[in-house]
Amino acid sequence: MTINSQTGSLQAIAEALRDGSVSARALAESAIENHEAHGGKLAAYKTWDPDRLRAEAGVADDALAAGIDLGPMQGIPVSVKDLYGVRGYPTFAGSPRELPPEWRHEGPVIRALRGQLATVSGKTHTVQFAFGALGTNPHWGTPHNPWDADEHRAPGGSSAGAGVSL
């Protein structure tokens, strides 16, 4: 099965991971290439760590190769809004300073993704404390709406970076 990681459904990508026609490493590299091609211009991410993404993809692939299937998100890159704690990533929640270490604690959604070996591509920009609907942030800038390459348009929503990362 050939799968387009940019347009394929999650179900199709998960099936391709399991039948071996795509690897988590290949998905990670696709996400990294896409970020490098557009990331600087689109500014979706507050924190981006391609080396960590590659390492997590390797773990997901190795588990699948060993016959360990932990769920449908195994090996699929996900971005996380910089409002949620992710072990090893700072949390700013759109504010000008990093929040205290307890904000790195993972809640139930992130724990569920981690339990399935989803790969975290990074933490995406949000408006300060997710309080706002336009997607603008005076501290970190505003992600660019990817549907208009010629004019900088706000993507909208407190999850502006998350939407742009997709």
Image (cartoon, rainbow, N blue to C red):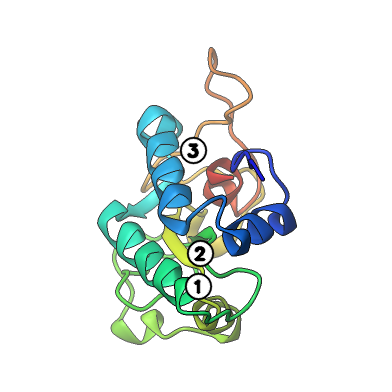
Q: Which mark is residue 75?
A: 2
Per the image, the residue denoted by label 1 is 64
Q: Dot 2, crowdedness within 10 Å: few (<14), some or many (≥20)?
A: many
Q: Residue at x 69, y 56 (%)?
A: 10
Q: What is the distance, in whole Å, between disc 2 and disc 3 at their CAs?
A: 26 Å
Dot 3 falls on a residue whose secondary structure is loop
Q: Which mark is residue 143?
A: 3
In the foreground, 9 or 138: 9
Q: Dot 1, crowdedness within 10 Å: few (<14), some or many (≥20)?
A: many
> Residue 7 location, x and y as percent?
67, 38
Q: What is the distance, in whole Å, between disc 3 and disc 1 at their CAs?
A: 35 Å
Q: What is the distance, in whole Å, between disc 2 and disc 1 at their CAs?
A: 9 Å
The answer to whether residue 156 shows anywhere in this view is yes
Q: Is residue 128 left or right of residue 89?
A: right
- In the figure, 159 relative to 109: above or below? above
Q: Residue at x 45, y 41 (%)?
A: 30
- Camera-near label (2 vs 1) is 1
Mark 3 vs 1, N-terminal side: 1
In the foreground, 24 or 156: 24
Amino acid residing under circle 2? Gly
Q: Is residue 94 left or right of residue 76?
A: left
Quadrant assignment for the C terminus: top right
Dot 2 falls on a residue whose secondary structure is loop
- In the figure, 36 relative to 5: above or below? above
> Residue 74 location, x and y as percent?
55, 70
Mark 2 vs 1, N-terminal side: 1
Amino acid residing under circle 3? Pro
- In the figure, 125 relative to 92: above or below? above
